[in-house]
Image: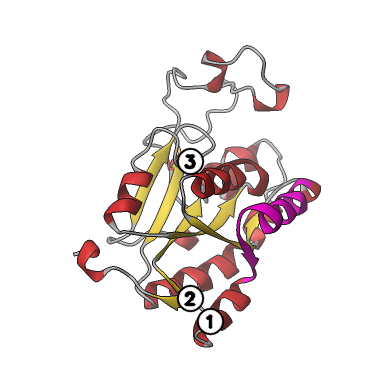
Amino acid sequence: MNIRPVLLVVDMQNGFCGLGGTFDKFGFNIGPYRAIIPALQTLIARMRRLGVPIYYSRAIREKSGLDCIDKVHRIIPESRRERIEKMPLCIRGTWDSDVIDELRPETDDFIVEKRRDSVFQDTEFDLWLKAFRADTVIFCGIDTYICVESSVREAFNKGYDVILVKDCVASRNPRHHLTTLEQVAEAYGWVLSSTELIEKIHAGQIVVSPDEEAST
């Protein structure tokens, strides 16, 4: 099977999974997020060698809080209320909003700034995929059942094939993490380990065909 993929690294930012970032300062368990870093490093390096475009999404908030979800929703779970004054998470222009050093983007990589869960919501991501004539999105990053799942569902409904790399996604809620893996495998696409994905490529079961014309 020939595919023209991009690799999407979702929200691996200092605020969420960096030592000394906002989540870490507030005592949240960022261990699951940090545990996938070595596998992500290997996967990104492999995809680069194959010529697959690398995209990073960054969750961004303005310091004023004007784009917080509290400004839009009246019915919202308490855990999702955004209190900028107490938890200034991933504010534009801060270290907190940057991708962690271990996965630092390179010059030719793409950064998608988003203000909601899905990487497609009010961003240029879909336009860039069309420019590359991409037909498949390989998903990794955090959090499995929130931003990753929201983006997977939207990718599928927009007509893209989906591959979720199960050892390169993580959640602070292990039960929800496993549920997302099950749901994606049943209804949206492939759920593979990074090793399984690379083995399929090496065996010729997946043939990666980057669009050289679109990338120049």
Find disc 3 in the rendering and name its residue: 96
Q: Can residue 20 be seen from the camera position used here?
A: no
Q: Which is more N-terminal, label 1 or label 3?
A: 3
Three-letter residue code for mark 3: Asp
Query: Mark number for residue 38?
Result: none
Q: Which residues are magenta?
A: 176-193
Find disc 1 in the rendering and name its residue: 205
Camera-side mark, 2 or 3: 2
Three-letter residue code for mark 1: Gln
Q: Which is more N-terminal, label 3 or label 2?
A: 2
Dot 1 and dot 2 residues touching (CB under 8 Å) = yes
What residue lies at 71% left-to-right and 51% top-to-bottom?
183
- As helix, strand or loop, the secondary structure at mark 2 comes to loop
Find disc 2 in the rendering and name its residue: 1
- As helix, strand or loop, the secondary structure at mark 1 comes to loop
Q: Position of residue 79 (x, y in %)?
A: 71, 27
